[in-house]
Amino acid sequence: MSFAKPIRNSPRRGLPPYLYSGAVQLPRPKRLLALIGLVALLGFGLPACLDHFAAPSPLLGLRGDIALEPKARGWVRAFEDDLLGHPLIDVHAHLAGRGRDSDCWMSPRMENPLRPLDFFRGRIFSAAGLPDKDAPDVAWIDHLAQLSSAMPFAARHHVLPFDQRYDQQGRANPEGSDFFVPNDWALFAEERHPKQLVAAASIHPLRSDSLEELRRVAARGVRLVKWLPSAQGIELGDKRLLPFYAESARLGVWLLIHTGTEGAVGEIDQNHLNNPLLVRAALDGGAKVIVGHCAAGGLAQDLDDPSLPMVPAVHLFLRLLDERGGEGRLLGDISTICNVNHFAVALPAILSRPDLHGMLVNGSDWPLPAVGPLIMLWPLERAGFLDKGDREVLQGIFASNPLLFEVLLKSRVHLPESQLRLDPVVFRARPELGLE
Ligand SMILES: [Zn+2]
């Protein structure tokens, strides 16, 4: 990236280049008009541009009759054989909504073009998860179930609600929350599509009714509670969380805890709360934990020796698996490991440890697989994780079903110069672990 040098001693100093780069300098009133035009273009044009950019999914996935080319059909057959009769499991599929027909909400920030970053994030999620931008919230649920049922094998997606941020006194902080999805919305999703969707929950542990809510959803069959510490304000080492850890263990409920850098939701300066080594506190408290994304994103402090420079968070996750994986209460979900900002570190780290693959479980992080630019195939091919020719086949699958694309991609990537892939156990439902 290059930046224009400031022009010194020029009457045009301080003006942006697009106002002086022409041969003729604009007279003052015209300059003013041009500025007004630019502001208007940004005001009206930005939302339109974002709608265009952030709308890869709406027309996709609607072709249930997807005609796979022969190579893709071969992959699907092999993948299905490896499932050994189990459905594909997905422990990480998000729900979101704007509240037109539900009690979900998004922060007004996410719909404000004057907050371009928040606006961009809001548009990306809505556009990827909804079949069209004016669709009701239930369309998100139906769209996911439709994509799933259009896959050539059975699949079960744990759909994740999202609790609000709470402060250290246990008071809800809606202003500090990006979005909210109540647990009942996930229960409704499961009732509506019981073959494809499984309700998960999200319960802030400092809520005054946290244990009560945990028991209520567990009685309805929920086996997974999702936390995103940096966005929800959860400190895993807080002693006040011990009763929640113990009760979740007693009820057989897994905690799905996001780890690694989070850029899509919440405050970036809170990322230290997502350090994978902090999960030790939950394990010490007796909880069963799925480490979200295998901590695939970003760097984290090595809490065992804070004098060391930051290290890839995924390396700390693997250290945790080496330490505690044998206890049978620790798993990692493999969502986003092929994403453009994660794969270079995450794939070699994970693929080169087949001894740990039995402790990994599939997650899609839906709707992110539908956001085209997040998974780029040519860098994967160039780095040797995909074979020549696979990219074109995968692109064809993406155009028809981004959910199928995402999982087949993860089944195809291998270590460069080797055929070492993810062990198929990663993709199977795991009834022995209470994850079906
Ligand atoms: Zn996620």
Image (cartoon, helix red, strand yellow):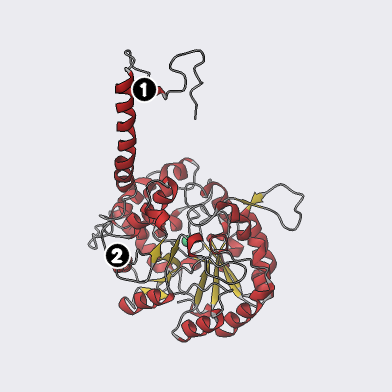
**Pointer 1 with pointer 2, Cβ within 8 A:** no
Element under label 2? helix
Q: Residue at x 36, y 52 (%)?
A: 123
Q: Residue at x 49, y 78 (%)?
A: 223
Amino acid type of the residue that numbered disc 2 sits on in the rendered structure: His
Counting residues from the N terminus, which is met first, the one under dot 1 or under dot 2?
1
Q: Give the numbered dot on residue 339.
A: none
Q: Position of residue 80 (x, y in %)?
A: 38, 67
**Is residue 128 among the parts visible in the rendering?**
yes
Question: Which residue does the numbered mark 2 point to in the structure image?
Answer: 143
The quadrant of the rendering that contains the C terminus is bottom left
Position of residue 92 measured from the top left corner of the image (x, y, whole percent) = 46, 66
Residue 248 percent coordinates (x, y): 57, 80
Ligand 1 is within 8 Å of the C-beta of the residue at disc 1: no
Q: Is residue 18 above or below residue 356?
A: above
193 horizontally vs 6: left or right = left
State the separation of the CA atoms marked 1 and 2: 46 Å
Q: Nearer the viewer, mark 1 or mark 2?
A: 1
User: Which amino acid type is shown beneath numbered disc 1?
Assistant: Leu
- The correct choice, above or below, for 305 with respect to 380 in the image is below
Residue assigned mark 1:
19
* Residue at 47 percent of width and 19 percent of height: 13
- Foreground of the two, 86 or 322: 322
State the image coordinates of residue 164 (x, y, percent, origin top left): 49, 67
